[in-house]
Amino acid sequence: MRIKTGIGQDSHRFDIENKNKPLILGGVIFPHETPLQGNSDADVVLHAITNAISGITGVNILGKIADDLCLQQGITDSSIYLQEALNYLKSWKICHISCSIEAKKPKIAPKIMEMRKHLSQLLHLTIDDIGITATTGENLTAFGRGEGIQVICVVTAMSEIKECE
């Protein structure tokens, strides 16, 4: 058995002037909260997971592929970008995901279980295979000062193929 680990990061500023777009984190809507800037729904949790999967596959989804989906096809749902990343896993199977969210606002803790449930459905994992933590960052970064949200994610995948591909 082989094991790979991918690390993903993403961050977006708040879009203070946008009153029509919802704040979405991990596929979960945070009602009455300021949304994040971005061409897509700007779901930094799904983007960080997608980037971590790209670290395993070597295929950069959040670049030309996502831009084409968004700008040419009008797809702004980050779960579609995540699904695209999953398509490149081939013989690899994700067995664990851990995400750390840095944000002064909104309060993340009340929505962690809902995010874990949603991610477990998207990724075909058990809730126990998904960890999410949150920190305010103690005002040390732009995210800790409430200017946006940052997520760092680690994805662990395994493959039954013993030889290098």
Image (cartoon, grey):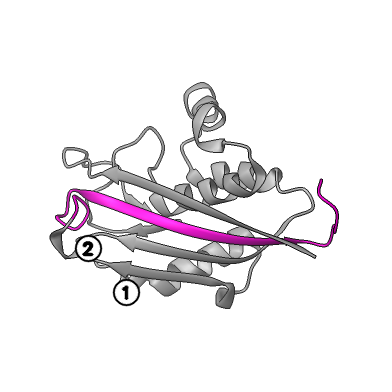
Which residue range is magenta in the image? 141-165
Q: Which mark is residue 162?
A: none
Residue with the mark numbered 1: 110
The three-letter amino acid code for the residue at tag 1 is: Pro
Q: Is residue 43 left or right of residue 72?
A: left
User: What residue is shown at x 24% (from left), y 67% (from top)?
Assistant: 107
**How far apart are the two marked residues, 2 and 1, measured between alpha carbons?**
18 Å
The answer to whether mark 2 and mark 1 are in CB contact below 8 A is: no
Q: Nearer the viewer, mark 2 or mark 1?
A: 2
Q: Position of residue 106 (x, y in %)?
A: 23, 62
* Total numbered labels: 2
Pointer 2 or 1: first along the chain? 1
Looking at the figure, which quarter contains the N terminus? bottom right
**Which residue appears farthest toward the bottom when viewing the image?**
128
Secondary element under disc 2, as helix, strand or loop, is helix
Residue toward you, 165 or 101: 165
Residue with the mark numbered 2: 137
Q: Is residue 100 left or right of residue 32?
A: right
Q: Position of residue 31 (x, y in %)?
A: 28, 59
The three-letter amino acid code for the residue at tag 2 is: Gly
Secondary element under disc 1, as helix, strand or loop, is helix
**Picture quarter containing residue 12?**
top left
